[in-house]
Image (tube, grey):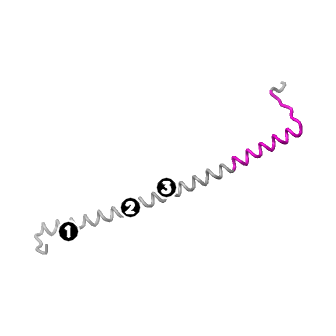
Amino acid sequence: MPHRNVQLLSAKAFNDLVKSIKIRIRRYGIMAELYNWQIQKLQEKVDNLNERKAGKDEDNVAEATGELEKIQKLFHETKNGDESL
């Protein structure tokens, strides 16, 4: 079966085509590296935000636990009629 849409190029045109393809491949390689770097930096920011949020959550839990202990102590003192109030 005969080939269709075949383009015959001179040696110079062929070399120019190969060169332009290599340039495009390098450009996409550079862009892929840039995108990977941006993804890494964004992931680091997300991780830092998650760590700070977890830290705040731990602080909130510790504060709530402390307040709960104070309330429980007050309740028991009040219930038992402790006169040290």
The overriding secondary structure of the stretch rendered in magenta is: helix
**Residue, disc 1:** 73
Asked if disc 2 and disc 3 are in contact, CB closer than 8 Å, the reply is no
Left or right relative to 83: residue 21: right
Left or right relative to 74: residue 54: right
In this rendering, the answer to whether 71 lies above or below 84 is: above
Task: Please report whichever mark, 2 or 3, sits nearer to the chain's N-terminal start.
Answer: 3
Residue at the (73%, 48%) spot, across then down: 26
Q: Residues within 10 Å of mark 2 (few under 14, many from 20)?
A: few
Please give the range of residues in magenta. 5-29
Identify the disc placed on residue 9. Answer: none
Depth check: give the residue in front, 64 or 48: 48
Residue at the (66%, 49%) spot, across then down: 31
**Residue, disc 2:** 56
Amino acid type, residue under disc 1 in the picture: Lys
Gap between marks 3 and 1 measured at Cα = 40 Å
Q: In the rendered image, which quarter contains the N terminus?
A: top right
